Image (cartoon, rainbow, N blue to C red):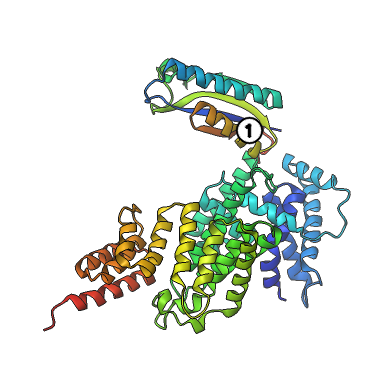
Amino acid sequence: MKQYLLAVQLDESAPPESEEEVQAMMARTGKVTDEMKAAGSWVFVGGLQHSHASTVVRPANGTTTMTDGPFAETKEQLGGFWVIQADDLDQALAWASKCALACGQPIEVRPFDDGSRRR
Amino acid sequence: MDLDSVYRAEYGRCVATLTRLLGDIGLAEEAVQDAFAVAVQKWDEAPPPNPGAWIVTTARNRAIDRLRRESTREARHAQALLLHQPDEPKEVGPVRDDQLRMMFTCCHPALSPLAQTALTLRLLGGLEVPEIARAYLVPEATVSQRIVRAKKKIRDAGIPYRVPAAAELPDRLASVLTVLYLVFNEGYTSTSGELLRTDLCLEAIRLARALAELMPDEPEVIGLLALLLLTEARRPARVGPSGELVVLAEQDRSRWNRELIAEGHELVRRCLRRAQPGPYQLQAAINAVHTDGPATDWEQVLALYDQLLQHTPTPIVVLNRAVAVAEVHGPALALATIEELDLPGYHLLPAARADLLTRLGRTADAVAAYDEAVALATNDTERTFLEARRARLSAREEPRS
């Protein structure tokens, strides 16, 4: 079993959706999460506030500094994510397809580094 | 059979089987290369009766020795895999299904199209990095970097080593067929006399044959093989004595390869009997009509293009169909079908327009279209061809002095 991050890429410059649309989307993604749980693939899920609420903490000379905002000021930001466990990439991609259709956003599939393949 | 041809014939199959045995493409390649190094020393006279089995067995034994010496987690994992195959006979040979698994892994849509092609040629075709680089006219470092990255992604992202389940098969098979088609095309549309590029065509046909043997019930696989054979059959007539392109209508049909044509026609008939048409089968059928009898039956070609257009309504199909429209309904109607097309940077669109305009007698417009096509053409042979056509027109246009 490998773990994969399914990250939702959100275009923050897009006009906000209506409350109804948001509710419908939440219902769809909630259904996918339930399916993941039933299949034993689910590890974690979370939706994020927009990047206006982000703060970056950087190490510098043994102390840290803080700056407002996300790492990069691009319109595409991390909107939320699932963590799943799957046998292989094909299984993870199959979940990602369901997630993409449910939330209407692109999903980046990234394997966790389990440390076993370091050379 | 000398060692080189054994290498060419068996490398991909052996790596595929070792990948299953070891669970890692990199380890499999090392083991197979070790085995060939041993073969160089031991086969001084003739290869053993079954060279593939000899290589796989030797590679497996070398891998076990090597893994015993190493203590990385990766090595332990591979060793565990090897030890958990108690039913594996001592003498093992390449397993055909392994090659199929390898095709699906190399052509996995999670890899970039360029990586898919490079991996397929390296791992299944057994082509060396410099050969691939020369064939694609890119630096060797680019190719090897592409292959290294792709193998790393296969390992780290967990791209599986198996034939996809029935539900995913159509999509995934399409990706394999696309890679083979692109490999062939890269070789075919290149300039004449470049033997390495011709090799790409032969390699694509070899892999398509292997795929057709492994998946005899997939009509699109048979369709692709037929398409490649019927296209390859015309190669000898496609280039004239001074390396210039010769269009279909002007080709010397006696120079076509009758054997390949017969084989291609038989495959197309097999597809027709199954009656599950798809884009490759339809293109193969079009090429079967082109290669049937002394001249092309354009009405039949147009009917097939109409079907193809329903299946794959792409601008390229519309453009290719226009050639048949011109033959059946005349150049004016054909021109109307491509008027709206938008294919930025694609030289064959202005080239087709130029040809139709020429036939309509609109010489000045035709010259302008040829100019556009020449500017966009990336291949010397094609550019020379277009320039020659344009020159012919300009000569006609200029007032006689």
Q: Position of residue A61 (x, y in %)?
A: 47, 21
Q: Residue at x 21, y 78 (%)?
A: B395
Q: Which residue is mark 1?
A: A113
Q: Residue at x 70, y 62 (%)?
A: B213
Considering depth in this image, is B282 or B16 the residue closer to the camera?
A: B282
Is residue B377 left or right of A78 when viewed as pictured?
A: left
Which residue lies most toward the left here?
B401
Q: Residue at x 62, y 39 (%)?
A: B157
Place residue B359 in its image quadrant.
Answer: bottom left
Q: Secondary structure at mark 1?
A: loop
Quadrant location, the C terminus of chain B:
bottom left
- CA neighbours of label 1 inside 10 A, class few (<14), some (14 to 19), many (20+): few
Q: Residue at x 26, y 64 (%)?
A: B369
Q: Is residue B290 above or below residue B108?
A: below
Q: Is residue B106 above or below residue A88?
A: below
Q: How many tags in the picture? A: 1
Is residue B211 left or right of B368 when viewed as pictured?
A: right
Is residue B200 left or right of A76 when viewed as pictured?
A: right
Considering depth in this image, is B151 or B105 the residue closer to the camera?
A: B105
Considering depth in this image, is B329 or B80 the residue closer to the camera?
A: B329
Q: Position of residue A113 (x, y in %)?
A: 63, 33
Place residue A33 in its image quadrant.
Answer: top right
The chain to which mark 1 is attached is: A
Quadrant location, the N terminus of chain B:
bottom right
Place residue B156 in its image quadrant.
Answer: top right
Q: Amino acid at mark 1?
A: Asp
Q: Position of residue A6 (x, y in %)?
A: 57, 29
Q: Position of residue B58 (x, y in %)?
A: 80, 60
* Residue B190 appears anywhere in the view: no
* Residue B369 appears anywhere in the view: yes
Is residue B90 left or right of B254 when viewed as pictured?
A: right
